[in-house]
Image: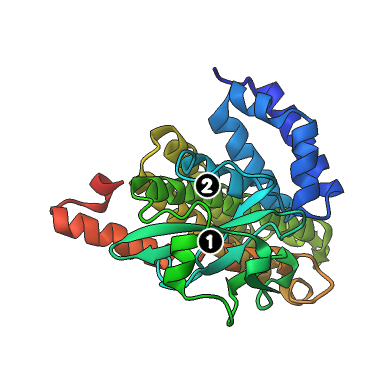
Amino acid sequence: MTMDADTLAELRLTLREVFAGASTAAEASRALAELGWEEAAGADPVATTVALFEEQGRALGRSRALDDLVLAELTGLLPAPTGPRVVALPYPAGGGEPGPQPGGIVLGGLDDVTDIVLPIRAGSGVGLIVLPPAALKAAPLTGLDPDAGWIEVTAAPDSVSIADMAATAPGAVGDAGPAWDAAVTAARRALAAELVGVGWAMLALAVTHVTDRHQFGRPIGSFQAVRHRLAEAHVGLTAAAELVGYAWRIGDARSAAAAKAVAGRAADDTARQALQVCGAMGLTWEHPLHRHARRAGVLDPLLGGAAYLERELGREAAANGVSMEAVL
């Protein structure tokens, strides 16, 4: 079933209200549940999921929607949760492969969370460990975008050995196999949509600035050089949005990787163009543009940044003796 354009537009307006009124991921997720999000998403899973993550990116919002997507792919491997469950995503090394120690980044915070799923390198595969937050050391992730509210969780120094933990933790899975690959694929599609949403927000801020500001008696946006910069950003974001939709419809890992790579590049290019046309004002702490640029900067490396994914797709093309167009 496909949702009509008017209904989808109304849904996006509702999502904007949700993210504007929620200060935490838990609040946003509760608001979505109260609105009957599952029923709405079931009517058109692709369009509604893309809309959710794009609007989350536009608003610089937080929710547990990404955790829900990842956990949906792991259903059957883990015991039923007793309360809100989240996933610690590996970050940011390489393509987001888990390391030999349990830990990672929880995107939605730990409010009312009962357990955390931690991927861990298990031989040549990926294992999963389910632990309560009390069993881990948690600290706010500072750095480029502290406003994201991400939490870094790691094994406590005085905890039992990793081998004992993996053997005794409830719901420990020795090798998640293709389920983890499917989870990463779904997460990359969602993150690509969120990056596109962040990009649209930056473009809107830039358009507003060049429309309101005047130079030599004319709006800055009337100058050809400015218009070309923003037009290029618009083309890049439009192409990325189309590829995100394609990746959701196709559903394979290759299209998801391509969508995330293209979305990461488009968001980065939009940030550069927006900062350029906004001039010195756009570089100030008071202007909101920096918040979106910083969010794009931390979302891109999550589960594989644009540069990493482009190299992987290029290696695949070279190994198969085909062009990049054939890989995509």
Kindly identify the residue that appears in the image at 37 percent across and 59 percent down. Answer: 126
Residue of label 2: 70
Q: Find numbered disc 1 in the image and state the secondary structure of the residue it sits on.
A: loop
Kindly identify the residue that appears in the image at 65 percent across and 23 percent down. Answer: 5
Q: Is residue 32 above or below residue 281?
A: above
Q: Is residue 165 left or right of residue 116?
A: left
Of label 1 and label 2, which has the lower sequence position? 2
Residue 316 spot, x, y in % from top left:
23, 56
Q: Is residue 289 above or below residue 211?
A: below
Kindly identify the residue that appears in the image at 74 percent across and 76 percent down. Answer: 283
Q: Residue 52 is drawn in which quadrant?
A: top right
Q: In this view, does 67 lie above or below 217?
A: above
**Mark drawn on residue 89:** 1
Q: Do the residues labelled 1 and 2 touch (CB within 8 Å)?
A: yes
Q: Find numbered disc 2 in the image and state the secondary structure of the residue it sits on.
A: helix
Residue 319 spot, x, y in % from top left:
15, 58
